[in-house]
Amino acid sequence: MKIFFRVDSSSLIGSGHVVRCLTLAKSLKKEGVKCKFICKDYDSSFTKIIKTQGFEVIVLTNSNKLFKDFFNKNWEEDARQTINAIREEKIDWLVVDHYGLDIRWEKKLRPYTKKIMVIDDLANRKHDCELLLDQNLVDNFEKRYQNFLPKYANTLLGPKYALLQSEYKNKHLIASPRTGSVKNISTVRPSSVRNIRTARASSVRNISIVRTSSVRNSKYSKSVR
């Protein structure tokens, strides 16, 4: 079986999309599945990390190195490049983890793969896929994709389908039981390596007065709201 992942990363996008795709790819590789990645050559992308994990990366050209257009308005050019990259491949699954790609892109790629899987957590656009995974626990998570998927699509929804790296997946086996109520939660979205330490330090300083805080790159926050 051969599976390709279409996913991007950069200092602005962050590493989350790549990390969860790598987690899935590593598990599939253990089962004998051949996995490859297709990524744009954005500045500060994580393609080198993907390669160090033992996966081939097909790099698509990109005129906007800083990825100011996070939602990829030029989806047709992206589709054309992706088709050229996989045209000669016999792909069983094409996994798409990208906020800027939707049903239009997926229909263009449909003739070049047997099946399409989408990894998403926004539930804000239509998809043409056989399988959709959203591991987040949010309001109405079991029904919020009803108007965005074809009738034949299967869904994996909720945290029980979380793509956890093995080092975190097994932590519950050795973690001590906790008692009492949760008073503070601090989360950090890794947007750039340079800003991670600052973000963590800021969270710790404010943890006594903030009940739920999310520290993320300000440009990224503005782009997704």
Image (spheres, rainbow, N blue to C red):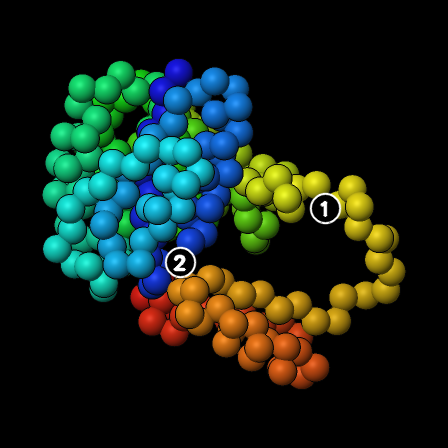
- Asked if residue 170 lies left or right of residue 123, the reply is right
Percent position of residue 152, x then y: 40, 23
- Residue at position x 40%, y 65% in the image: 192
- Residue at position x 19%, y 35% in the image: 82
Percent position of residue 224, x then y: 35, 63
In depth, the one of 131 and 93 nearer the eye is: 93
Percent position of residue 11, x then y: 35, 62
Residue 14's tag is 2
Amino acid under disc 1:
Lys
Q: Which of the two labelled residues, at mark 2 and mark 1, occupies the earlier sequence position?
A: 2
Which residue, as the protein is rendered here, is positioned at the far front? 52
Q: In the picture shown, does residue 184 fall above or below 16?
A: below
In depth, the one of 182 and 85 nearer the eye is: 85
Quarter containing the C terminus: bottom left
- Residue at position x 23%, y 63% in the image: 66
User: Could one spot residue 99 in this view of the protein?
Assistant: no
For the residue labelled by badge 2, is the local secondary structure a helix, a strand or a loop? loop
Q: In the picture shown, does residue 10 fall above or below 187?
A: above
Which residue is denoted by mark 1 in the rendering? 171
Quarter containing the N terminus: top left
Percent position of residue 221, x then y: 39, 68
- For the residue carrying disc 1, how many other residues have a C-alpha within 10 Å: few (<14), some (14-19), or many (20+)? few
- Asked if residue 9 lies left or right of residue 19, the reply is left
